[in-house]
Amino acid sequence: MKLVWSKERASNAYIDTVQSCQIFRESGVAELISAMAAGWNAQLIVETWSHGGVIPTSVGLAVARRHTGGRHVCIVPDERSRTEYEKNMAKAGMSPEILVGEPEEVMGGLVGIDFLVVDSRRKDFARVLRVAKLSGKGAVLICKNANCISRTGSSFIWRSVVAEGSRRLVRSVFLPVGKGLHMAHVSASGGDRSEAKVKGGRGHKWIKHVDQRSGDVHFIRR
C-alpha cells in the first residue's frame, strides 16, 4: 500500500485550521501543513516542539488528526516545554499526546510514522529524522523554520534518512513559506527494489542519480 492523496480531506482541514488559528493571528504554514497531513490521510502524525516555539502549526496538525481519525504526538525535550505546549494547545481546544525525552528514547514506541514535522532550530532535528520508524506505506517529512538550512544541507539530510534499507526519496522541495519549509516524500518500504524488478526486466540496468541541488532521486533505465 502507498500513501493516497484526498483533495476533499485536505480542503476541509485547511478551512478548519484557518478558523482555529485566528486566535493566534498567524496563517500560512499551519494551513498548508494541516492540509497536507489530512490529504495524505496520515494515521500517525508526529512533531517536535520546544520552549518558545510557535503553536499554529501544532494546531493545524491536531485539526488534521480530527479529519483522518489518526494519532497526533508531540515530542518535547523537557517538562518546561511540556507545560508551555500543553497550556497553549488548550487555548485552542486541543490536547494531543505529549512525550518528553531524547529522540532515541521516545521514538521506540512510535512505529509507523507517516507524517513527521521537525523544527530545524532544534539541534537534534536531523537525529529525529534518522531514528524515526516510518510507515511501511511511505511518509512525508517536513523541516519547518528551514531558512537556516542550505539546500545542500537539506539534500544530505534526506539522503541520510533513506541511506539504509529499501526506501527511496520520491521527491523533495523547499517552499519559501513562513520561515521556510523543506519537505520530502519517502517511498513505501521495498519500493526501490520492487520498482527496478518490475520495470527493469531482463537486459536493462537501472542507474540511481541524485540531484545535488534539490536532493531529488531519479532512476534512469539503460
Image (cartoon, helix red, strand yellow):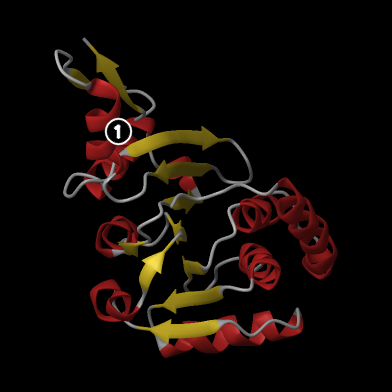
Task: Give the farthest residue toward the top.
Answer: 222
Q: Horizontally, is 80 left or right of 122 in the view?
A: right
The secondary element bearing badge 1 is classed as helix
The percent coordinates of residue 34 (x first, y second) are 66, 58
The image quadrant that residue 69 belongs to is bottom right
Amino acid type shown at disc 1: Glu
**Closer-to-camera residue (60/140):** 140
Measuring 27% from the left and 78% from the top, which residue is drawn there?
A: 108
The image quadrant that residue 122 belongs to is bottom left
Task: Give the farthest residue toward the front.
Answer: 202
The percent coordinates of residue 180 (x first, y second) are 54, 42
Q: Is 218 above or below relative to 21?
A: above
Q: Quadrant where the C terminus lies?
A: top left
Note whether residue 205 is visible: yes
Q: Which residue is mark 1?
A: 195
Measuring 72% from the left and 46% from the top, which residue is drawn there?
A: 7
Q: Residues within 10 Å of mark 1 (few under 14, many from 20)?
A: few
**Closer-to-camera residue (56/108):** 108
The percent coordinates of residue 125 (x first, y second) are 35, 59
**Closer-to-camera residue (201/62):** 201
Q: Is 26 above or below relative to 149?
A: below
Q: Is 100 above or below relative to 203?
A: below
The percent coordinates of residue 1 (x first, y second) are 43, 52
Q: Horizontally, is 13 left or right of 132 in the view?
A: right
Measuring 44% from the left and 43% from the top, which residue is drawn there?
A: 185
Q: Horizontally, is 64 left or right of 97 in the view?
A: right
